[in-house]
Amino acid sequence: MKFLNLLCTIFLFSILNTSCGIYSFTGASISPDTKTFQVNRFENNALLIEPGLELLFRNSMIEILENQTNLNNVNSNGDIVYEGEITEYRISPTTATADNTAAQNRLTITIKIHFFDKNDPEAEFDQAFSFFSDYDGTLQLTGAVRDNAIEEIFERITQDVFNASLAKW
C-alpha cells in the first residue's frame, strides 16, 4: 500500500511538473533562455522634480523583478532591459470645500518604460504607466505623507510594468 501511495505521488508530481511548461506562480511567462535582467537609470524629465525619485523607482523595479522571478540582476548585457523616464510628477486638487480650498489632493506619477527582450524582440514595447494617490487637502506632501504616496504609486506601476512585460497581461 505504501508503494502504491509513493507511486501515485511520483506520478502526480511528474504530471504537474511537466504539464505547465514554463510557469511561475506570479503568472510570468519567461523564456528558458532568459537568465538576467537589467534596470537602467531612469531620467526625471517631469516639470516638477522630486529629488531622488528616479532612484526610488529603479530600486522598486529591481525589487519586484527579484521577488517575482528567478532572474539575476546585472549591470550590463541583461537578457531583458528596462529603461525610461519619469514624465509626470503632478499635485492637483481633486475635491473642494465650501471655502474654495482643496479637501483632497492627488499626486500623479507617470513613467514611460522602454522594455527590450533579447530572446523575444516582438515583446519589446514603449509604453507610459501612470497611477495616483490621494491624500487629505490639509496635509503637505512631505515626510511620511509623500513617502506613503510614492510607495503606493510605485507598487502599482511596477506591478503593471511586470504584467505588461513578463506576464503578458
Image (cartoon, grey):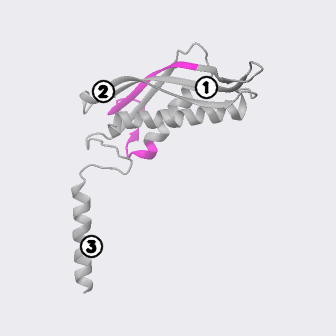
User: What is the spatial separation of the Cα atoms under label 1 and label 3, in whole angstroms?
Assistant: 52 Å
Instruction: Give the mark, 2 or 3, whose residue is nearer the N terminus.
Output: 3
At 22% across and 57% down in the image, what residue appears? 18
What is the x, y in percent for residue 103? 71, 27
Residue interval drawn in magenta: 66-89
Residue 139 visible somewhere in the drawing: yes
User: What is the spatial separation of the Cα atoms under label 2 and label 1, in whole angstroms?
Assistant: 29 Å
65 or 146, which is in the foreground? 146
115 or 150, which is in the foreground? 150
Secondary structure type for disc 3: helix
Q: Which residue is mark 2?
A: 124
User: What is the spatial separation of the Cα atoms under label 2 and label 3, in whole angstroms?
Assistant: 41 Å
Q: Which residue is mark 3?
A: 9
Instruction: Give the mark, 2 or 1, whose residue is nearer the N terminus.
Output: 1
What is the x, y in percent for residue 151? 59, 35
**Disc 1 or disc 3, which is closer to the eye?**
1
89 shown above or below 158: above
What is the x, y in percent for residue 2? 27, 85
Q: Which residue is mark 1?
A: 107
At 63% across and 21% down in the image, what residue appears? 91
Q: Is residue 48 left or right of residue 9?
A: right
Residue 70 counted in the magenta span? yes
